[in-house]
Structures are given as structure tokens and as C-alpha cells.
Amino acid sequence: MLTLKLALRNLLGAGLRTWLNVFVLSLSYVVIIYIHGMLDGWDVQAKSDMMHWQTGQGQLWQKNYDPLDPFTLQESFATIPGELIPSVESGDLAPVLITMASFYPEGRIQSILLKGISENQQVVEIPTAAFSGGGADIPAVIGKRMAEANKITVGDLVTVRWRDANGTFDAADVRIAAIFNSNVPTIDAGQIWIPLRRLQTMLSAPGKATYFISKKSELLNYSGSDWVSKDLKSLTAEIDQIIKTKSFGSSIMYVVLLLLAMLAIFDTQVLTIFRRQREIGTQIALGMTRWQVVRLFTAEGAMNAVLAALLAAVYGIPFLASQAASGIAMPATTDTMGLAIADKIFPVYSLGLIGVTIVVVLVTSTIVSYIPSRRIAKMNPTEAIKGKIQ
Amino acid sequence: MRKLLIGIAMVPGMLLAQNPTATQILDQIDKNMASKSRIFTATMVVHAARGERVMEMKIWSEGDKRSFTEYLSPAREKGTKMLKLDDQLWMFSPSADRIIQISGHMLRQSVMGSDLSYEDMMDDRKLTDVYNAAVIGTEDFSGRPCWVLELRAKGDDAAYYQRKMWIDTERSIPLKEEWFAKGGKLLKQTTLSDVKKIQGRWFPTKVTYKDMLKTGDGTEFIMNEIQFDGAIPESMFSKAALR
């Protein structure tokens, strides 16, 4: 306790030099928490959006289905199993059928995915209720990206051409019944959603589906030979991977900040030990062991981190809280990068994040303070009192 | 009496000439158009919404199953080669220095931005194998009297469920063709013109393809110098010839 008191008094006594170190170190705290909070916020928001729009609580895939390989689409649908039909009818399981197709916005040809989804589904927020009504036309819903890219509005008729299960060309006009606004581009760009039964008829594939989106995770326990279960974790693994990569990239910035702070502490420690040689010699002469003196100087350096945490709290808490409340605006281009990013990201600061940040900075400061202090253990007290350089 | 017998014997032939069946007409087209091999240079003019693109190429083909195409111009496409062997298609692009196989959804892409897709090039089955044909009337097209044939798919694996053809009654060559979707929507239209007599056969040297769902004036394919039944070295139809 005496060591800590002494350390604090010495540190405050150093004045401006201490406060410069503390300020730089406090910036490290705030930046680390801010960046990690932003990434955690993105993670939470992206997974929540994906769950509400794309993945549900998990999916059942036809065994040949590979969303990254369009070559598999022609062989990746199977008959909806009888055991799952009650869940489909109750809306807890949304069957989806996919085929490659071409569509002709403003007379141009464009490859798209034509997706059929059950009208009564209650799993994802795709507005399938808009399928009802509209007369003889095939009703369709599309995302805002698709609509903006092709200048389509509600009520427009667009021609779609596809090949049925036997490879025969067919074409029809679909009427845009609704345009949805989702942060998940993987259900939007280059895709048209129509009623499942219509697509089954169009493809001559009655009763077939490519995958199911489940509202309840227990429905994923189905073990039919044609279907493979995909839990939420595996469906959002891509987000985890991106966050991990982003986290590594952004860590460079605060590692540089932390290095600067540590360099300042290290230099200060070297200078302090040089300037306070007489004091060190006197302390040893008065009965302190060499290691007690080393501990005192190490505590002085480490206390920079404690003061920095207090300073960071003074200006960091209002700043971080305001960011969490108002959100961080994302550039418009990120929307087209295929990632589930909202217009604004609301940072999430967990206690774990704050705790780990404090521990990391404190431990790093302690180590950096200890390294120059080790010289004290080799000092001769008589020479030190004389002020002789050792 | 002898003259009467000869006259009676000639009646079926005359009737055939006046009212041939659709199958006979298609067989006649095959005889006229088919050749053991064909070597020709061609110009492809793509009339797109944003302007016109002209490409020149040389094509060596053997029946419907094997063909080799080399693009001669423009500079951007020069050296690009395509090889078709039965139901497989490869392409070599000098800028990428890679041979790629065109398959799956890539077959649906347009060939060099034209109104033709790769899969249109791949459909090489005989019409009589895939379609039931019927003569549904006669009509003048481009000032020529034509049989109008309607073709409906025999099975459920034809790319186009229905086709309609206008056949020159005197020269036995198609002058126009329409390709329909299963639901009846007109998808593509082909018109054949600039008919010339080459090596003793009538042959249309200009084909205009039009994807009816796209805007633009279609794609013209003009055959400049055609040589029928010329010798083509076997090495031409190998992947090694692509580089």
C-alpha cells in the first residue's frame, strides 16, 4: 500500500510529463473500446438482420444445394417430405425453390435467381403477404437494391425467361407487388421472389423445394436422407469471418497508438531512473531492498494506466455513449459490397470488452515500466548516492 | 395406253411437289443446307441499344457436331477462339491466356454481346428428331412463296417448345424462323436472306438473329466466303488448336 501511495505521489509530482503520457494512453483506451464496440455492434446487427430476413433459426438444405455454386441449382431440389408439411402449412417452415433465370429490364438481359417462397410463411420478413391478389399476373417482390439498379417501381411488369426442369424455355411477365427494404443484400441483389406454387408449376416441379427456412431450431432435427440441417451459427459463419478479418485490420491502428503510449512510458521510466539515482541510492541505504525499489518504480509506470483509465472515463464515456445512441453512419458504398450492413451501426460496449481493454493496457504498461526498472537491481547504492552514472 | 400409265405413275410425284409433307420439306432442307464440312469467313454485326459492334471471324465446321471459330477483329477480340465438340464448348482468350469450358449457367450468356447465346450454338439435334412438324399453310415472305411449318416438341426436353418456319418452296431453304416459349411468348426470330447459289446449292449468306425480349435491332451474321466439303485437318478439332 505504501508503495502505491509513494508511486502515486511521485507520479503526480512529475506534472505535465505524467499527464502527457496519461492522455496518450487514455486515447488508446477510447479507441480500442470504440473500434471493438463498432465491430461488435455490426456483428449483432448483421446477425439479427440475417435471422429476420434470411436464415431464420436455421435452414434445411437439399443435399446438393450449394449457394456459392449456381451449377448445382438444377439438381438441388427435392420433394417436400410429408413430415414437414404440417410445419409448412402452419408457417413455421418456409420452403424456398430456386432457379436461374433471365430478366429483361428496359430491354436489357440480366441473369437473376428466381426464388419461390410459400405465401403463408411467418419466418422471414420478406413481404409474401403481397403475393395475394393481383389477378392473373405472377406477383413478385424484390429488394430495394434490385429495384434501384433496374429502375423498377411497384406495379411494373417485367419479363422473365427461365428453363423448366426438363430444360424447355418459358417466359412470362411478372408484376412487382412490393419492394422491400432489407440490410441483407444476399436476398435482394439479382433476385426476384414469387409464390412457391407458381414457381413449382413454371418449372414443372410440383411439391419441390431447394431449402427450408425454419422459425424453430427444433425443426432442424429432421433427418431425411435428402436434407441437410444448417444451424444459425454455420449460416452466419461468414459474418464471424468478416468481423475477425476487420478486427485484425483495425487493430493495427490501436496497436500503433498503444505502442506510442508505451514508448512514452518507457522513455519516461529511463529518464526517471537516471534523474533519481540519488533517491534510489538513499532508499536502498535506508533499508529498502533493491526489489522493493524496482517494485516502486514499476508501480509508478503502471499507475499511468490507472490514471489513463480515469481520464478516458471522463471524456470517453460521454463520447462513446453518444455514439451508441446516435449510431455511426456507414458510407453508401458498403451497401453494395454484399455485406449485411445497416445505414447506421450502433456500437455495443460489453463489460467484457471494457474489462479486457483495461487489463491489456495495464499489463502492457506494467511490463514496459518494469523493463527499465530492472537496472535498479544492479545499482551500487554508494555510487548511486554520489550520482555516478551506472 | 403407255402414255396414260406413265401419266398415272407421275401423279404421286407431282402431288408430292405440290403438297409435300413437313418431314419431306425438312429432309429437303437438310439435303440442301447440310454438307460434310464448311469453311467460311463471317462478319457479325451486333446492333445493340448503345451502338453497333462489328466482329470478323473464320469458322471451320464439320456437320453439326464439331466447329472451330477464330475471331479476326476487332483488335480486342482478335485471337479469341472457340471449339465445339458435341455438347462441349471451350473458349480461349489471349488476354487471359486461359482455356475455359463454357458450361452450366455460362451457356446462357450472350456470345460477344450478340443476340445469340452459347446454348443456341450447342443445340445440334436434327429437327425431325425433336419436333413433330406440320405444314400449316403457304405465305409470301420477302417476295418468295413459302411453306409455313409449325414444329411442336415431341418430348419435354426440347429447348424451345414450339417453332415456326417459313420455307422457300422452290429453293428449299428457310427464310424465317420464330422460336416460342412453352407459354407461347415469342422469344427469338431469325431471318435468312442474301440467298446465293454456291457450289450448286442455294444458300442464305445472311442470318439476322433477334432476341425478341431485348431492345435493339438484333445481330446480323454475314457469311462472306463459303467453301463446302473442303478438307479440315483433324488437329483443328482439338483443344491444342485453341492456343
Image (spheres, coloured by chain):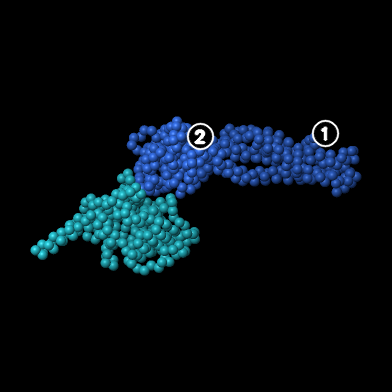
Chain colours: A blue, B cyan
Work out whether B131 lies above or below A52. Answer: below
Horizontal side of residue A309 vs A215, given as left or right: right
Q: Mark 2 to mark 1: distance in Å?
A: 63 Å
* Contact? badges 2 and 1 (CB < 8 Å): no
Identified by mark 2, the residue type is Leu
Task: Same chain for labels 2 and 1? Say yes or no.
Answer: yes
For residue A2, the mark is 1
Mark 2 or mark 1: name the one nearer the start of the chain: 1
Q: Residue furthest top?
A: A90
As drawn, B7 above or below B137: below
- Find numbered disc 1 in the image and state the secondary structure of the residue it sits on: helix
Identify the residue shown where x is 68% and y is 40%: A28
Identify the amino acid type marked 1.
Leu
Q: Is residue A354 left or right of residue A366?
A: left
Do we see residue A202 in this rendering?
Answer: yes
Closest to the observer: A244 or B124?
B124
